[in-house]
Amino acid sequence: MIVVLRPEAREDEIESIMGRIERSGLKGVLTRGSERTIIGVVGVDPVLPDLRDDVEIMPGVEEVIPITKPYKLCSREFQSERTVIQVGRVKIGGDGVVVIAGPCAVETEEQILDTARAVKRWGGHILRGGAFKPSTSPYHFRGLGREGLKMLSEAGKEVGLPVITEVLTPKDVELVVEYTDILQIGARNMQNFILLDEAGRTRKPVMLKRGMSAKVEEWLLAAEYILSQGNRQVILCERGIRTFESATRNTLDISAIPLVHKLTHLPVIADPSHGTGKWYLVTPLTLAAVAAGADGVMIEVHPSPDTALKDGAQSLTFDHFADLMRRLAPVAEASGRPIFST
Ligand code: PEP
Ligand code: MN
């Protein structure tokens, strides 16, 4: 439930309300918004009838509203204005469409630096590159680990772009936090609750990819894990789901974009590379995702997709990336939100 406070509520009144909530074994999360100050009540059963009745008549309380959704902190009921996440000079979820691009995996210093330069040159905002790669087969490339993190971070610094990379296990969170501006939690780990808790204890933005068989509600509950640990900077990423269709790697669920915007205040970006698995479908699906209101896109780009160690078939060449950026500009503009510029 949400406790909406009166504009004139005093600090000691707020403290008493928090105390009453905590005595029920629940947690109060105070948010001072531009229009109103509220306390979100989270816990196992956040609408205990006694608690609701007691709080409703406490001094400083305007009204008590039950949240009907199973996720609380990430719901629109809890926060009506959209969350904007600032990474360096880039704003995700604000007035501009953000483009994240880079190779699936960091392979060599030269590969990541060349890609970083191309991403920057054609107007990308954030550099991606995996150093810890989840892999369906144990015989495939699994990333360069710490060395890869260093190469990614140095390439980002060299061209002046923030970076994002995946963290695979709770024990690596501390290491990855040192090198990255945004933590990525991959589709396969969307319901790794220990990892979600750990990422929630950091103060870095987290991009949470939708699990390949996850319902929207499960995805938002996974985001709730991160938020409930105190980290409010969560970006959702629609990356395609498993369907009966095998002509594409996954089915990019475009409808999830406006749906998630309706249900939550968190930004949502689309990943048409993993969403389709085919490089020639990446640009059309990028345009569709942005037209549907995506706050950004994540695109795999490689200097030479033919020789890429991972996901070459869905990676764009630099020329194709330049072409995507040119075609994206008018679509973004027409959708009411131009490509982000500082
Ligand atoms: C990736 O972004 O490289 C990746 C592994 O994505 P996903 O978790 O969506 O499969
Ligand atoms: Mn990939």
Image (spheres, rainbow, N blue to C red):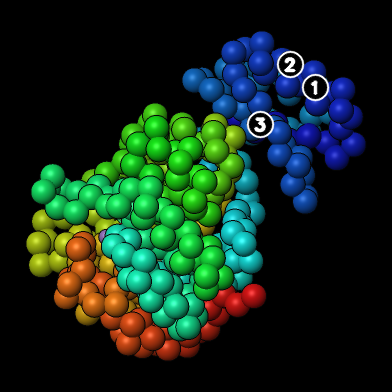
Q: Nearer the viewer, residue 204 or 62?
A: 204
Residue at 15% across, 66% down: 248
Q: Which amino acid, mark 3?
A: Val
Q: Is residue 73 above or below residue 153?
A: above
Label 2: which secondary element: helix
What residue did someone put label 1 on? Answer: 15
Left/right placement of residue 60 relative to residue 167 reads: right
Q: Which amino acid, mark 2?
A: Gly
Q: CA distance from mark 2 to mark 3?
A: 12 Å
Label 3: which secondary element: strand
- Do we see residue 111 in this rendering? yes
Q: CA distance from mark 2 to mark 1?
A: 6 Å
Q: Residues within 10 Å of mark 3 (few under 14, many from 20)?
A: some
The image shows residue 326 at horizontal and vertical percentages of 42, 88
Tag of residue 326? none
Disc with the residue nearer the chain's start (2 vs 3)? 2
Residue at 10% across, 67% down: 247
Q: Nearer the viewer, residue 40 or 327?
A: 327
Mark 2 and mark 1 residues within 8 Å of each other at the beta carbon: yes
What residue did someone put label 2 on? Answer: 19
Label 1: which secondary element: helix
- Do we see residue 215 in this rendering? no
Left/right placement of residue 244 relative to residue 323 reads: left
Q: Which amino acid, mark 1?
A: Glu
The image shows residue 331 at horizontal and vertical percentages of 45, 83
The image shows residue 257 at horizontal and vertical percentages of 41, 61
The image shows residue 229 at horizontal and vertical percentages of 54, 32
Q: Is residue 49 above or below residue 67?
A: above
